Amino acid sequence: MRMQNDFVLALCVQTSMAIPDYQTCMLPFLQFLADGADHTLREAEDHIAGYFELTPSERAALLPSGQQGVFKNRVGWARTYLKKAGLLESTKRGIFRITDRGRSTLASNPVKLDVKFLERFPEFIEFRDASRTEGSTAQLEIPVRQTTPEEAIELAYQGLREQLAIELLTRILGCSPTFFEQLVVELLVKMGYGGSRRDAGERIGQTGDGGIDGIIKEDRLGLDTIFIQAKRWQGSVGRPEIQKFVGALQGQRAKKGVFITSSTYTAEAAEYASRIDAKVVLIDGKQLAELMIDFDVGVAHAAAYVVKRIDSDYFEES
């Protein structure tokens, strides 16, 4: 498990090398404040983005959750750590400027600013140690790697999710074809197709028309029908199987179909499905497991963690 998580972390860092980590942002951040004027976080972001010559797409890159930008998150943590070290101060909400300590730090011409450098300031040490709870021997250390706390949490979450997906596929391969068809029905119903579980269950696996395992209503009113092929395979599904399914769709004068497998598709199969007139969606084992996790099929909630932030509006005095 540790090796897999390390791989996920390394992969994430490798794919976003162009975006500076939060420690790398510290020195240009402080240098930007050297004019002594009041500045906003957005102004600092624009300056640092220009300093590192980031492209619009790099600035727009999101964390795995899609809730916040990677670059914005890292600049925000750079500001937090510089503030905790007493190198900058807030003058009012959303506004900050350099302190005398910050000017002295720049005057020493540091090669870089990072967590290790900030540990020379007692305020930062106090901030670092503030997480030590009374009677506890554990201490939450300031991360010295290249990820921010939010990134570390999301990377850990992605690692757990990927491991769960692997376990799901292992279980699926050990089930009977009939159970796999039932699983597909359950998933489609959870996704909003087929009306009720009973309606969908009555339709699946009854057509017996070569290449089609069942049909399901596209919506609760049954305004359209989707034909389904469910294959619990270990080997890759090739173009001939997709052609067989498409031929069956044509025999039913159908325009929509979903081919679901526990394995993968060959490049030829995917290319063929992308250029035919009928709308055929291919769902491989990886996508199947992700959908099962998203719609709570075959999984149970183990724990939930809520990440909170300051409610700035609460502290506004009228």
Image (cartoon, rainbow, N blue to C red):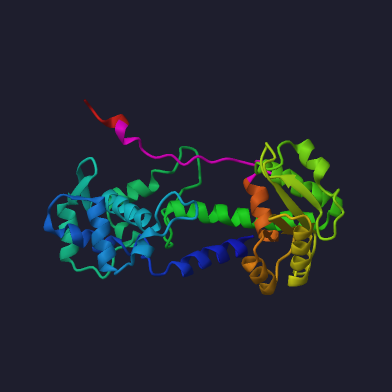
Could you say where residue 182 lies in the image, as x and y percent from the top left? 80, 46
Could you say where residue 31 lies in the image, as x and y percent from the top left? 20, 62
Report whether 74 appears left or right of 39: right
Quarter where residue 199 is shown: top right
Outermost residue toward the bottom?
268
Residue drawn at the location 28% of the way across and 67% of the way down:
112
Q: Which residue occupies the foreground of this view, 133 or 288?
A: 288
Q: What stretch is highlighted in magenta?
A: 295-313
Residue drawn at the location 79% of the way across and 36% of the way down:
198
Q: Which residue occupies the foreground of this view, 20 or 261?
A: 261
Could you say where residue 108 lies in the image, as x and y percent from the top left? 18, 66
Report whether 121 appears left or right of 247: left
Quadrant of the frame with the N terminus? bottom right
Report whether 262 appears left or right of 270: right
Q: Which residue occupies the foreground of this view, 183 or 195?
A: 195
Report whether 134 appears left or right of 31: right
The question of residue 296 being in magenta is answered with yes
